């Protein structure tokens, strides 16, 4: 039966020993000379204390474990802002790679592959040609998808701007969750290791509030891991789109939890947790959270304008065209100045 290991971890200084003890249970999953992609969350250039990217100490422990087994690891991601080296530099992951002599690469060079729900998904050749993948997500909320955990982290294996365009192609959050699930099944990580020592609550995944969750979680199955972590945060798993859709696709296996941990979390303000009576649902759907550019904080870098999949943003006018906006919240996710507020509006 699938196991989900939960370990309390008070800080990153203690993480090496705690994680190494867990990793040793999985030694026989790897063979010498295998090429293994280590896929952290490298969303955008942030220092480790921001809680946005997987902490370099976690990456270092995993790389040392693989190197000791004679494996040939490389670190890769396809960041939303910048590239693997620039995000690696700010996040501390590049230093770790250089110290250990491990390559750090952009997940580019697309190959079109098909999932069960979607076809023509452009996944990096480097992912498909790796012998194995080790998935290193961060515990964070996500304004669109409620959480970003193990299943969503593998979406970084889809190349560059393709990721933003999928928000438009998928249309609804349920459809987008099915795309994330398709990608996760294609990437098929051997191991998922969640960095929840420090993570993010509120309007994550980059402009929320840093929170100490003091958790390390490991499993061979990210669906089970995500389900357990969400449940232990006191959040009903079925409000998380990837878990709801994975449940419908019967992808959440029977599992056993080893270890104890629980915490609380503030969800994004885009999420309605209290069930809304049917009679009010239509009205509430019209009264939605939309992005609004905060003129005092915006520095006109145009990152949001370039990343918006529907060209709904005009930075010269500091305006969002709500007739085009699909509320994917990518703009809020990529803004380096936290200058996109999510406000209620009747559409
Ligand atoms: S990303 Fe943020 S700072 Fe840059 S233009 Fe958009 S709102 Fe302004
Ligand atoms: S304005 Fe923001 S939320 Fe709306 S479609 Fe563009 S990126 Fe997505």
Image (cartoon, helix red, strand yellow):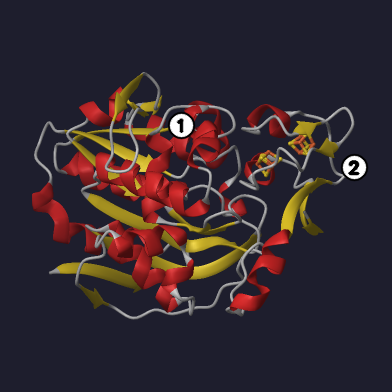
Residue at image coords 26%, 64%: 252
In front here: 223 or 338? 223
Crowding at dot 1, Cα within 10 Å, few <14 / some 14-19 / many 20+, comes out as: many
Q: Position of residue 247 (x, y in %)?
A: 31, 65
Q: Position of residue 279 (x, y in %)?
A: 64, 77
Picture quarter with the C terminus? bottom right
Give the structural element (helix, strand or loop) at label 1: loop
Mark 1 lies on residue:
78
* Horizontal side of residue 341 vs 163, given as left or right: right
What is the quadrant of residue 238 in the picture?
bottom left
Does residue 222 lie above or below 261 as drawn? above
Picture quarter with the N terminus? bottom left
Give the label on residue 295, or none: 2
In front here: 66 or 336? 336
Label 2 within 8 A of ligand 1 by Cβ: no
Label 1 within 8 A of ligand 2 by Cβ: no
Q: Position of residue 267 (x, y in %)?
A: 60, 68
Question: Which comes before the other along the chain, label 1 or label 2?
Answer: 1
Give the label on residue 48, or none: none
* Horizontal side of residue 290 vs 167, given as left or right: right
């Amino acid at each position: 039966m699938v196991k989900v290991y939960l370990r309390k971890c008070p800080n990153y200084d203690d993480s090496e020993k705690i994680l190494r003890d867990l990793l040793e249970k999985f030694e026989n999953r790897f063979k010498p000379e295998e090429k293994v992609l280590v896929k952290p969350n490298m969303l955008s250039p942030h220092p480790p204390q921001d809680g946005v990217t997987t902490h370099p100490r976690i990456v270092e422990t995993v790389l040392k474990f693989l190197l000791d087994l004679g494996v040939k690891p490389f670190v890769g991601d396809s960041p939303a802002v910048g590239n693997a080296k620039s995000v690696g530099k700010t996040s501390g992951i590049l230093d770790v790679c250089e110290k250990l002599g491990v390559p750090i690469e952009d997940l580019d060079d697309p190959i079109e592959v098909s999932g069960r729900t979607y076809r023509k998904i452009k996944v990096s050749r480097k992912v498909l040609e790796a012998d194995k993948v080790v998935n290193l997500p961060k515990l964070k909320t996500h304004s669109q998808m409620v959480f970003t955990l193990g299943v969503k982290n593998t979406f970084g294996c889809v190349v560059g701007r393709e990721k933003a365009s999928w928000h438009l192609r998928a249309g609804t959050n349920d459809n987008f969750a099915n795309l994330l699930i398709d990608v996760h099944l294609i990437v098929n990580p051997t191991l998922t290791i969640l960095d929840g020592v420090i993570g993010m609550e509120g309007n994550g995944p980059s402009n929320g509030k840093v929170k100490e969750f003091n958790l390390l979680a490991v499993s061979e199955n990210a669906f089970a891991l995500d389900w357990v972590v969400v449940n232990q945060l006191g959040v009903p798993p079925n409000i998380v789109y990837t878990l709801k859709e994975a449940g419908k696709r019967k992808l959440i296996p029977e599992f056993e939890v080893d270890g104890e941990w629980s915490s609380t979390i503030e969800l994004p303000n885009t999420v309605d947790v209290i069930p809304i009576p049917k009679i009010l649902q239509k009205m509430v759907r019209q009264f939605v959270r939309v992005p609004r550019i905060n003129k005092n904080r915006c520095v006109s870098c145009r990152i949001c304008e370039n990343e918006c999949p529907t060209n709904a943003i005009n930075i010269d006018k500091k305006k969002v065209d709500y007739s085009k906006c699909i509320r994917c919240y990518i703009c809020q996710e990529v803004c380096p100045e936290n200058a996109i507020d999510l406000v209620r509006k009747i559409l």
